Image (spheres, rainbow, N blue to C red):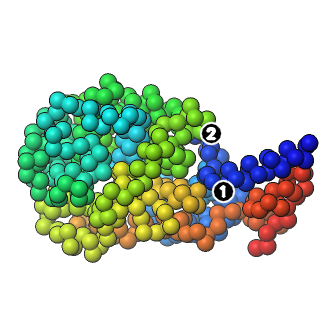
């Protein structure tokens, strides 16, 4: 009887491993695989590259929910923050938690004038065709972007006369701030309040550790950016999506639906270029110039499909901040970089640097040929349950010989 149970357990274990990524309890501290961090080829490659790039502040790689690479520049502490527009990922998580019913997409703001012209889905996929929150590019700033007094008139004008893209085509916009007001309208909570009550506790993140910049006049958070997260906190958001929206093994830990994650990682448009903004156009930079230095990507719901890795998706922030997830590898890659601030460089040159250097760590870490398995003291690789025979041996109390290096 015991042997039969062992066979059943083995079959269940193998089937589970083959069909789903490891699910860890994100309300707890992330487990660190010290052997992998100190000796795996993957960690060594990541650290070597990171040390060669003076602008890199911090890098963290998770595999199967464990920290397998962790780099911080000498002058950067473990609690340093610098995620920029990655803040939009928290918006994505909040929206996915708020909009649990399909009907609510159309019913969220039934009295708003712009509802007749665009949908919430178009805003979260950045395919509304709007130019910006503020119609006049010269008046557009990151200060007035989240002020409702500026937003509402700007919407009326841009709906009537879109000038960057057509509906259904990608254009990088500040419409994420409008979605902050949608969250308030639907839930009665600001994005920060909703995050504090419904998301952060499940991720084991103390609200008092989080800073989210607010607009003084409106009291609304800057949803386009301004949420300060550490690399570990960023990694937990990435792992949440890798786990299909659950913050732990139990269904009660779910933050967003699996359908929301799938939709976030489904391409809405193939020609996404996050550098195509009112500011860059106002500077005289053309779309063709941008495409030369920053090739367009696929875009889902505030996630970008990358050309590296078999199935990598990234939540990006200015200057090379990002959270990248490679589902087929069970990996999450987090990066924080210094913003390029050389006054002698033209904007197009800065964008080229960001596009070239900003993705190197993620390219390395999502290379399927690169192992993040650590080396045991005898030189062998840490054993894995890679086949039925090794699983059976370990289940029955035996041992598995280390794989040859």
- Kindly state the secondary structure of the residue where label 1 is placed: helix
Residue 149 lies, in percent from the top left, at 13, 34
Question: Mark 2 sits on what residue?
Answer: 249
Quarter of the figure with residue 182: top left
Bin the neighbour count of mark 2 within 10 Å (Cα to Cα): few under 14, some 14-19, many 20 and up: some
Residue 113 lies, in percent from the top left, at 13, 36
Between 147 and 19, the one lying in front of the other is 19
233, above or below 384, in the image: above
Looking at the image, which residue is at 59% across and 39% down? 248
Between 127 and 320, the one lying in front of the other is 127
Question: Mark 1 sits on what residue?
Answer: 18
**Quadrant location, the N terminus:** top right
Whole-number angstrom distance, CA of label 1 to CA of label 2 = 16 Å
Looking at the image, which residue is at 47% across and 40% down? 257
- Tell me: 11 left or right of 274: right
- Kindly state the secondary structure of the residue where label 2 is placed: loop
85, above or below 220, in the image: below
Looking at the image, which residue is at 38% across and 34% down? 101
Looking at the image, which residue is at 7% across and 48% down? 160
**Visible residue check, residue 233:** no
Residue 156 lies, in percent from the top left, at 9, 42
Residue 374 is tagged as: none
Residue 5 lies, in percent from the top left, at 85, 44
First reached walking from the N terminus: tag 1 or tag 2: 1
Between 271 and 6, the one lying in front of the other is 6
**Quadrant location, the C terminus:** bottom right
């Amino acid at each position: 009887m015991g042997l039969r149970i062992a066979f059943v357990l083995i079959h269940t274990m193998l089937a589970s491993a083959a069909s789903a990524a490891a699910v860890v309890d994100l309300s707890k501290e992330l487990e660190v695989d010290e052997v992998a961090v100190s000796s795996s080829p993957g960690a060594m490659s990541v650290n070597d590259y990171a040390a060669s790039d003076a602008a890199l502040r911090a890098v963290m790689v998770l595999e199967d929910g464990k920290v397998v690479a962790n780099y911080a520049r000498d002058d950067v502490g473990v609690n340093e923050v610098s995620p920029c527009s990655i803040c939009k990922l928290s918006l994505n998580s909040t929206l996915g938690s708020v909009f649990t019913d399909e009907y609510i997409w159309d019913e969220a703001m039934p009295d708003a004038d712009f509802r007749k012209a665009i949908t919430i889905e178009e805003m979260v996929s950045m395919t509304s065709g709007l130019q910006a929150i503020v119609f006049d590019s010269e008046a557009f700033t990151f200060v007035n972007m989240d002020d409702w007094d500026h937003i509402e008139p700007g919407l009326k004008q841009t709906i009537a006369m879109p000038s960057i893209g057509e509906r259904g085509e990608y254009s990088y916009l500040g419409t994420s701030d409008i979605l902050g007001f949608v969250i308030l309208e639907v839930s009665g909570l600001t994005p920060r309040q909703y995050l504090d009550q419904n998301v952060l506790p499940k991720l084991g993140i103390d609200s008092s550790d989080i800073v989210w910049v607010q607009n003084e006049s409106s009291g609304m958070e800057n949803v386009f950016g301004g949420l300060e997260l550490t690399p570990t906190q960023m990694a937990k958001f990435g792992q949440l999506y890798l786990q299909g929206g659950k913050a732990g093994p139990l269904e009660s830990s779910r933050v967003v639906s699996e359908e929301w994650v799938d939709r976030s990682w489904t391409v809405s448009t193939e020609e996404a270029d996050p550098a195509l903004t009112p500011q860059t156009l106002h500077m005289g930079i053309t779309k063709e110039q941008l495409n030369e230095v920053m090739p367009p990507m696929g875009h889902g719901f505030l996630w970008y499909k990358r050309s590296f890795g078999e199935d990598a998706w990234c939540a990006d922030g200015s200057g090379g901040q990002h959270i990248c997830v490679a589902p087929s590898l069970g990996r999450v890659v987090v990066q924080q970089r210094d913003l390029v601030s050389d006054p002698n460089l033209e904007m197009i040159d800065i964008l080229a640097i960001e596009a070239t250097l900003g993705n190197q760590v993620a390219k390395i870490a999502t290379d399927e040929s690169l192992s993040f398995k650590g080396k045991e003291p005898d030189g062998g690789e840490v054993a894995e349950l890679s086949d039925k025979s090794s699983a059976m041996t370990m289940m029955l109390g035996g041992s598995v010989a280390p794989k040859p290096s």
